Image (spheres, grey):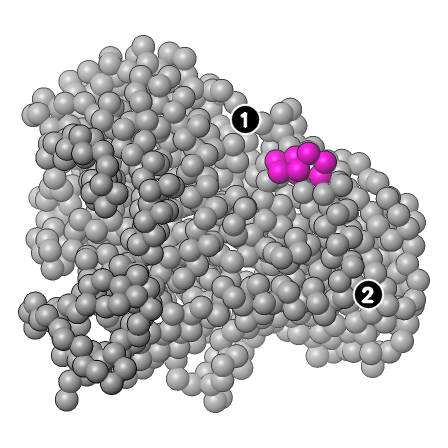
Amino acid sequence: MQKNKESNMKLWYRRPAKQWVEALPIGNGRFGGMVFGNVSEERIQLNEDSIWYGGSKDAVNPDGLKYLPEIRKMLFDGQLEKAAYLARMAMYSTPKYYNPYQPLCDIKMYFTGLEGEPEDYIRELDLDSGVVGIRYRMNNVQYSREIFSSYPDQVMVIQMKCDAPGTLNFCVNLNRRPYEGESRVPSADCVVMNGECGKDGVEFSCALKAIAKDGRVKTIGDTIFVEDASEVTLLLAANSTFREKKPQEACMNQINSAAAKCLAELKQRHMEDYRSLFHRIQLTLSESDDGFNFPTDERLERVKNGGEDAGLMEMFFHYGRYLMIASSRPGCLPANLQGIWNESFTPPWESKYTININTQMNYWPAEVCGLAECHEPLFDFVDRLRTDGRKTAKKLYGCRGFVAHHNANIWAETRPEGLPLTAVMWPMGGAWLSLHLWEHYAFTLDKDFLAKKAYPILKEAAEFFVDYLVEAPDGRFVTGPSISPENSFYLPNGSKGAICMGPSMDTQILNELFTACIKSSEILEIDVEFRDKLAVIMERLPKPQIGKYGQILEWYEEYEEVDPGHRHISHLFALHPGSQITPEGTPELAAAAYKTLQRRLENGGGHTGWSCAWIINMFARLGNGESAYAYVLNLLRKSTYPNLFDAHPPFQIDGNFGAAAGIIEMLLQSHAGKIHLLPALPKAWAKGKVCGLRARGGFQVDMNWEAGELTEVVIVSIQGGPCKICSKIPLKVLCGNEEVLMNIKNENSFEFDTQSGKRYRLIMKA
Ligand code: FUC
């Protein structure tokens, strides 16, 4: 099949979804749905990002501070088991777990007058417009539905049509088994479901209104009944007391203002808004497109059966961007473990914010894909974390600044949450998240953002560690009690340990955090004293160490891992997403990082979706395109559901985002102080094109390549300033027709000065 623009922009199926992971997600960042596409009994499972069970709690362990010195002493004395035993009682929160993210409700539609089997059934998600469509023919009548969730109008729209007058007959209602609230019928074309989420939890409202072009609409009980119509629009709104004092009123306002617009206008406004973000990137990795002839589930099956499909990889990448636009927009909560899509009242890991990798991974593609706006909910969330994080810092550790552990919830709470010894006692979640604001600065050079938003957060994150770090017997400053997420080790006596002092990842995060603070304070020309203090501490942080297998050590001591194939590869933070280890800058450590990866993988690592996605990124950073590609393939083969949701398993959205980021990391990198073009291009993507990528330093980058070699690069400078490039091929730089002077550093590294807003064309030297 000849490839056309649309080829890899549609997920399409010949059947309705049987299971939830076949249904198609829509969302406006806040209000989402999973569309099943059933013909006679349609279900759309709904979510709103603020519907969580329960309220905020003050649950930091009141005995923590008292026992902290004793626990640290035990750890330094090698009494690790005793320390863990005590920490679980003294430091873990009271009570232990956060409450879960909840489904909003289901919308159910029951159609009548549809006898027989549908013909030419198609269900699709068009990534180019952000609209789900369902089409089929029955009794010679053509039926269609279009469904989208609009950000500008804050409503979900379901439009139904048929091409024979009066053949659209259905009734529709809202339900929430088994946690039904109450039904309301505010008018003859509208029903409302209200509910609450337990003591101190949010109250919410979901409203549904039908507008028929012809035929009749009325309510019977709490159901809307539509008769003899040929075109009907359903408008849905949902709100909770998290944002609105009167959720039902807010719903009615949104529905009424949407109803005042015609459907074409609603759709147009949705598409314009969606496309303003989605159209920022183009990517082509495949030349022909045979795969598109197959419905997406069959196409994926072909890959699972050993096929390779660069077009499906392209689609998977675009789907990652789609999911980000659908689950994280300004004003919303950040994407949780499932983005916004969750059908269970007891979702896996409560569908929280797990901040020892998962939430961070969700945002890896944001900046590089030009979706900085979608990153905003995370910035706001980190800002909110400070309020509770200050209390936790003070109460549990007696320190200034703010701290967050490995999980957070809607209330932006920060205590050591849960029970597993391998995960809970980890004070680095806030520090890692703060680095996301630094990344935004690195990509945009937005000094105002740095001054007003990023630096105050980075500084407060660092302040905590100034007070918190302790001196180890060898004079180094270490964290602890802490863990290396979420691995454990064997102690010399054969028993298992996890809680320890100074795990490698902590130091690597601190290295990155302190560096960001020092650079920020230099750029902003403030806080000289604080900057100097951090520099002094940094000198005494442990450096990455190489162990007996040639690997990067995961802990301060060289322990044997209980699970050498563990899914977390935390001690390679310095390779990715950090930048302390690079093949060029630290070749020995890069070689050790490679060994570390190999050892994990030889022992079964990379088996969850997100772990596999992280490995793509790490191999890309090591410049190993073939291995990175192998794990893109692996992810599709082993960790992807028919609707292309990531299968941890079960569904967890981080793998989708991590893979989208990984695919780009193979094409463009900019973490090491220069732009690296095609750093890890695999043979399978020998010819391709990408437009609209962002690079650190304030650049936009377009590239074409053929036979595995760059053919043309266009760089637009957003802020001006020096542009440093790393390329294996000699290039010359043109601005208009003028050749720009380059400063050649070595054979594959050069630099030229740019002016803001100017376009630079890099072409191969003959
Ligand atoms: C961490 C991971 C698990 C899962 C959970 C939400 O605990 O180790 O694999 O992703 O977060």
Q: Report the side of 221 relative to 612 (left or right).
A: right
Residue visible at 38% across and 41% down in the picture: 453
Residue 232 marker: 2
Residue 437: image location, x then y, percent: 35, 46
Image quadrant where residue 591 sits = bottom left
- What secondary structure is marked by label 2? strand
Magenta highlight: main SS: loop
Q: Report the side of 694 relative to 734 (left or right).
A: right
Residue 727: image location, x then y, percent: 17, 72
Is residue 31 visible in this depiction of the protein? yes
Q: Is residue 1 above or below residue 177?
A: below
Residue visible at 74% across and 78% down in the picture: 119
Q: Report the side of 227 relative to 287 (left or right).
A: right
Residue visible at 74% across and 66% down in the picture: 263
Asked whether 245 falls inside the magenta stretch, the response is yes
- Between residue 550 and residue 52, name the one nearer to us: 52
Task: Decide: few, some or many residues near mark 1? Use Cα within 10 Å; few <14, some 14-19, many ≥20.
Answer: some
Magenta stretch: give its range: 240-247
Residue 128: image location, x then y, percent: 54, 71
Under mark 1, the amino acid is Ser
- Between residue 746 and residue 662, name the one nearer to us: 746
Residue 19: image location, x then y, percent: 62, 57
